[in-house]
Image: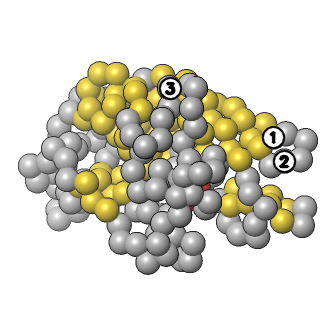
Amino acid sequence: KSPCCDGSTAIAARPAVSRAAPVLVRAPAPGAGGGRGRAGALTRSPAADEYRVNVTSDRQVHTWTGTESISLTNNSSTSMGTVWLHLWSNGVKGCRAHAITVSRLVGGTAGIPILGCTSLPIHLSKPLAANHVATLSMTVQIQLFHRNDRFGFNAGVVFLGTALPTLAVHDDHGWNLNPFVDIGESFYSLASN
């Protein structure tokens, strides 16, 4: 059990199996009861209208600290009480290390992370009605590891792939909580500004 997101403890992860299958968390949330938009298209929610990130690094450029806010729209036909954040790079070294730390969350309360600490439920401060907008704000700390890969640093080069907390996608099949994988790209999110 890993304490989480109250401003005093970090979220860290344990490595996922490289060939892990995506997890669909069935929940009566956006898209429940059909949820099809255009003819036959899946309704994907929440829409991330905008990510605002303001981080700075330490002198070695291995630790980044700052703030992130996410404006999101519930573009489904039902209200939403919980959203999920992907903390994919927590899968690099496992729960024993602190790759991505989220604290001082405003707009919701963090639950207990799952999938090796790479998926974090956020229980919104109040249910988000259909077609309404909410904003989540948080302090983030990103700790890079010495590794020549999409997340880390090596030979004077810094790699920040999958470094930021990102909204998970809910569609007619449930929440798409894809685990971290070392080989290949299992990352699924909606595009945003």
Query: Horizontal and vertical percent for residue 109?
Result: 40, 27
Query: Horizontal and vertical percent for residue 70?
Result: 50, 35
> What residue is disc 2 on?
61
Tell me if residue 99 comes above or below residue 183 in the rendering. above
Residue density around tag 2, few if under 14, some if 14–19, many if 20 or more, within 10 Å: some
Look at the numbered disc 2 and give the secondary structure of its residue: loop
In front here: 26 or 127?
A: 26
In the picture, measured across the screen, residue 160 lies left or right of residue 70, that is right
**Which residue in the rendered view is the most extreme toward the left?**
33
Look at the numbered disc 3 and give the secondary structure of its residue: loop
- Going by the numbered disc 3, the residue's amino acid type is Asp
Q: Kindly identify the residue that appears in the image at 40 percent across and 62 percent down.
A: 178
Quadrant for the C terminus, please. top right
In the picture, measured across the screen, residue 62 lies left or right of residue 160, that is right
In front of the other: label 1 or label 3? Answer: 3
> What residue is disc 3 on?
6
Residue density around tag 3, few if under 14, some if 14–19, many if 20 or more, within 10 Å: some
- Going by the numbered disc 1, the residue's amino acid type is Ser
Residue 148 figure quarter? bottom right
Labelled pair 1, 2 in contact (Cβ < 8 Å) = yes
Q: Kindly identify the residue that appears in the image at 51 percent across and 70 percent down.
A: 181
Quadrant for the N terminus, please. top left
Camera sees residue 180 = yes
Query: Horizontal and vertical percent for residue 62?
Result: 80, 49
> What residue is disc 1 on?
57
Query: Horizontal and vertical percent for residue 171?
Result: 26, 55
